[in-house]
Image (cartoon, coloured by chain):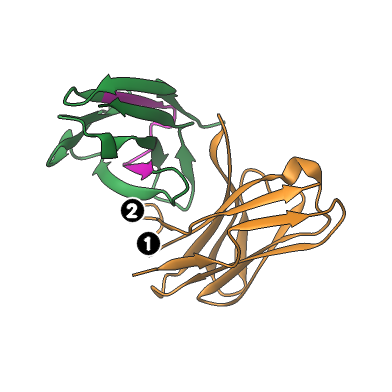
């Protein structure tokens, strides 16, 4: 079946460093790729998304890149802060109700 | 500004009990979802509803049913709870399928003993 592989499963960085999380999808018809952040005990919240007609999107310290040929997309967080510590989920969608989620990355930002 | 609410944050039920989890959204969204979240498995879709009384099975519908009698409310029903249904259950809604943000509820952590 369709799947999204997400790496790494855990990531520790020093405050101020950058963090990169990568996802690879299998369905070439996927055209919408959201990233969600879930803080401990809280609901997942959308932090950035990208559509297949765009290669990169930035929002302050967060950016997402998409390589359609290789079928992978990545989340980049620069100048990490302790409040960036959370679980991050990627997802892929083909324009239907069906989202395929990655298994999550637990990011720890060490002060 | 709370947009998606779930009836309980924590729930403990016994094996064989019938369990109701309720979700309400105030954004007039057509689409509503029930997911199950387990460590190392990410979010898996149980059921989806695209309109009142309309539903589609997701990846893991076995042992679950749903009800959507009103646009803003989507209920997940465990007909006979089993220990392997111990999990975090997340409800979500979205305006347009596959192209807009999904808004998640706070989750219900269900323990079946």
Q: Colour of chain A?
A: green
Asked if badge 2 and badge 1 are on a common chain, one would say yes
Is B36 on the left-hand or right-hand side of B5? Answer: right
SS under mark 2: loop
Where does label 2 land, which residue? B99
Residue B69 horizontal/vertical position (percent) = 62, 78
Residue A94 against residue B28 in the figure, above or below = above
* Residue at x-position 39% and y-position 52%: B98
| Residue A7 visible in image | no
Q: Chain B is drawn in which colour?
A: orange
Residue A16 horizontal/vertical position (percent) = 16, 26
The magenta region covers: A20-38
Label 1 crowd (10 A; few <14 / some 14-19 / many >=20): some
SS under mark 1: loop
- Tell me which chain the residue with mark 2 is part of: B
* Residue at x-position 62% and y-position 43%: B59
Residue B48 against residue B39 in the figure, above or below = below
Q: Residue A83 carries which label?
A: none
Where does label 1 land, which residue? B96
Marks 2 and 1 close (CB-CB < 8 Å) = yes
* Residue at x-position 80% and y-position 52%: B81
Is B77 on the left-hand or right-hand side of B93? Answer: right
Q: Does the magenta stretch include residue B97?
A: no
Q: Locate the N terminus of chain B by quadrant.
A: bottom left
Residue B85 against residue B20 in the figure, above or below = above
Residue A8 horizontal/vertical position (percent) = 40, 20
Dominant secondary structure, magenta: strand
């Amino acid at each position: 079946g369709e799947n999204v592989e997400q790496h790494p499963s855990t990531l520790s960085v020093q405050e101020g460093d950058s963090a990169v999380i990568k996802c690879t999808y299998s369905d070439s018809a996927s055209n919408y790729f959201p990233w969600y952040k879930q803080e401990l005990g809280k609901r997942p919240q959308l932090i950035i998304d990208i559509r297949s007609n765009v290669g990169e999107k930035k929002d302050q310290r967060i950016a997402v890149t998409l390589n359609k040929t290789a079928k992978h997309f990545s989340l980049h967080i620069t100048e990490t802060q302790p409040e960036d510590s959370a679980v991050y989920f990627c997802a892929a969608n083909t324009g239907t109700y069906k989202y395929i989620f990655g298994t999550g990355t637990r990011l720890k930002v060490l002060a | 500004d709370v947009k998606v609410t779930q009836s309980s944050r924590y729930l403990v039920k016994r094996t064989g009990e019938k369990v109701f989890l309720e979700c309400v959204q105030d954004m007039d969204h057509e689409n509503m979802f029930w997911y199950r979240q387990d460590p190392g498995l990410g979010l898996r879709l149980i059921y989806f509803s695209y309109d009142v009384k309309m539903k589609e099975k997701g990846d893991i519908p076995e042992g679950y049913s749903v009800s959507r009698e009103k646009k803003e409310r989507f209920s997940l029903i465990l007909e006979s709870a089993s220990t392997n249904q111990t999990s975090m259950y997340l409800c979500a809604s979205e305006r347009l399928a596959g192209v807009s943000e999904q808004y998640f509820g706070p989750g219900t952590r269900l323990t079946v003993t």
